[in-house]
Image (cartoon, rainbow, N blue to C red):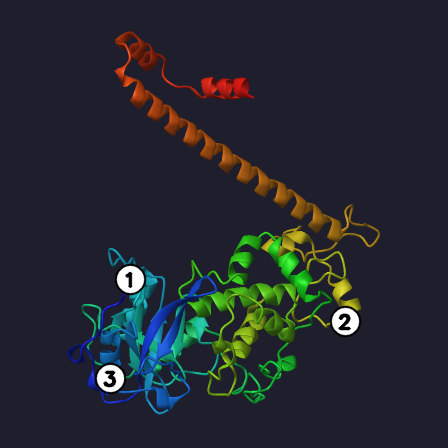
Amino acid sequence: MTPPLPTREQLPDDLLERANWVGWRTQTRGGAETTVLKDATGGPASVTDPSTWTTFDEALASARDGPADGVGYVFTDDDPFVVVDIGECRDSETGATERWAWELVDRLDSRTEVNPSGTGYHVLVRGTLPSGSDRAGSLGLSDDAGFFPVTGDRLEGTSAAIAERSDVLAAIHGAYFEADPEPSPTPAVESVAPDSDRAPVDARLDEVSGPGNDLADDEVIDRASTAVNGVKFTHLWRGDTSGYDDRDEADAALCSILAFWTAGDARQMCRLFRDCGLFRPKWDEVAHADGSTYGAKTVHRAIRETSEFYDPSGWSSAVRPAATPTDEDRRGDGRSDSALDGRSDDPGSEPRGPPPTTASPVGERDAFDRFSELRARLDEAVDENQRLRDELDAERERRRDLEARGRGGGAGERDEKAGRGWSLFDWLRSRATLR
């Protein structure tokens, strides 16, 4: 669905007087939709390259002529604006909005637009963001090196002006996000020349990395694919973002899964992400005031928010991120499988692993192979079931054609057929006779 294009009359002068405008268009890459920025000529634009920005009028003309689907505003350190992105809270057909979103809109009490998909809101305010996380689920905050699409579709009853709301931003950030313990949580980026053969270095990721484990890249993919949430992982790995508000949210979801299976190995996570269908140039863009890339920040958050890591070295399926990353410590932190879903074997007591002499009846690799074999058989059964359904539908269609052609026969014969009807048993018996 193409979003509406805003007019000058719909927008505040605070935005119109700044040449921070770009066009945007939705494209399909690797089977998934992504948003790409366009300059006034239809060429590529970037939130970090002011030469690709233009005035509102030029960006609007470009969108009307076809190179772009809509227009948007780019945030910088020089402007006072913050956008509060409230996603997946609104029914695009009826406009019905979830209570938590209404409370945020009412509390911010500033200019609020319906987002292009119609499933959420963008609230634009003046203010300063505290340091720390800036996205939690369907709620996000952005104030620099970012972009938001402008529709001009202002929510009825909200202010047309952009209000100062630093105090409210601080309260919302404290309620929904985790503050960083230090001003610069992610180290500076190591730059790489554009013509360099090696992949860009995301950051000094060793400083934020978890304990890690001994799984190779292909083993991580194999185990993540055959886990309980393997379908979710497979879809994300292939670049499928359906079910997510935007690409950033899908990136965060995949990185959370990778954080568990790699035990927070930041470099391995980055290496794996570069091979998945979600990877895009934005991964290597400097997107935060502290100089960190979008990819490094996404990995950092995923590691910090993962409460348990996978540990293949012992009986335990998971280890706490805070555990000392030595083999002895990991083996001593044995936990039962029920710890993975938050259950405790003995309510009121710390989870305990089995006695040291107890061995798994089936080797871990054999279990994974057996699971893969059973899943393959299930896939074959599903395919066979679909084939039989298709064959049955074709037989029904053939019978309808024969009945239509035979309507010229005797009335007695038609009455007999009408009375007898069609049964699956007769059809199966006829198929057996033919064989």
Q: Secondary structure at mark 2?
A: loop
Separation of marks 1 and 3 at Cα, in angstroms: 23 Å
**Residue 289 in sight:** yes
Q: Residues within 10 Å of mark 3 (few under 14, many from 20)?
A: some
The residue at 62%/56% (across/down) is 340
Whole-percent x, y for residue 299 in the image? 56, 74
Q: In screen coordinates, is 107 left or right of 370? A: left
**What residue did someone put label 1 on?**
1
Whole-percent x, y for residue 75 in the image? 35, 84
Q: Is residue 13 above or below residue 413?
A: below
Q: Is residue 182 above or below residue 275?
A: below
Whole-percent x, y for residue 349 in the image? 67, 56
Q: Nearest the camera: 7 or 349?
A: 7
Q: Nearer the viewer, mark 3 or mark 2?
A: 3
Mark 3 touches mark 2? (CB < 8 Å): no
Q: How many marks?
A: 3
**What residue did someone put label 3 on?**
58
Q: Nearest the camera: 359 or 287?
A: 287
**What residue did someone put label 2 on?**
326
